Image: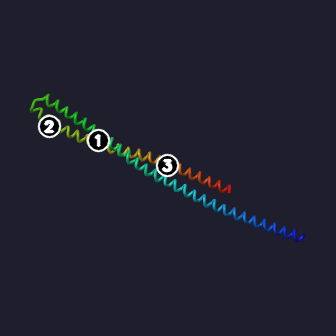
Amino acid sequence: EKKAMEARQKAEDDARKELEAFQEEARRNYKIEAEKKAAEEREKAEEAARQELIAFQEQLRLETELKTEQAKRKVEEEAQTELEKAKATIQEEARKQYKAEAEKKASQERENAEQAARQELTAFQEQLRLETERKTEEAKRKVKEEAQKELEKTKATILEQSKMAKQSIEAEQKVI
């Protein structure tokens, strides 16, 4: 009986050791799988963030181009309107001068007025060109600033999501 009891005790000890070894192996395998899965999830999250950033940058580029074109078109339309007003004003002034003066004096005055009008028109066109360039550059700058702000916000969001994902993974690892 004593030998049978010792043999049974030894068999139970051996079975317990084997069970503990099996459980330890299972824990290690589970930990390895969990780490592997966490790494895969992290890679997926990082890839998704990269894709989102790329899409945002493309959208931002397209919006910048659109806003630049809109600003340029608006400045050109305003410039054309001002040019037409200036032409109309100059023509009206010339007509008034023609009626008010004698033919000889009118002819001389017309030449002088046309010369002044050409110079004024040239000066106006140069001023208009400079104003168009300034407004276009200002619009580009504003669009770039807005784009930079949006990019910084997106980067901050991505970093925050990455931190949260990392914390989640660490929490899972602690639980494991």
The residue lying toward the viewer, choosing from 123 and 28, is: 28
Residue 44 horizontal side relative to residue 70, left or right = right
Picture residue at 14% right of the left edge, 29% below the top: 99
- The CA span between labels 2 and 3 is 60 Å
Q: Which residue is mark 3?
A: 152
Query: Closer to us: mark 1 or mark 2?
Result: 1
Q: Image height check: is 173 above or below 76?
A: below
Q: Quadrant of the C terminus?
A: bottom right
**Which numbered disc covers residue 111?**
2
Residue 162 horizontal side relative to residue 67, left or right = right
The residue lying toward the viewer, choosing from 1 and 39, is: 1
x and y percent of residue 107 in the render?
11, 34
How many residues crowd mark 3 within 10 Å: few (<14), some (14–19), many (20+)? Answer: few
- Kindly state the secondary structure of the residue where label 3 is placed: helix
- Kindly state the secondary structure of the residue where label 2 is placed: helix
- Residue type pointed to by label 2: Glu
x and y percent of residue 90 in the render?
21, 34
Q: In the displayed image of the protein, which residue is found farthest to the right?
A: 1
x and y percent of residue 168 in the render?
62, 53
Q: Quadrant of the N terminus?
A: bottom right
**Which numbered disc covers residue 128?**
1
Q: In the displayed image of the protein, which residue is found farthest to the bottom?
A: 3
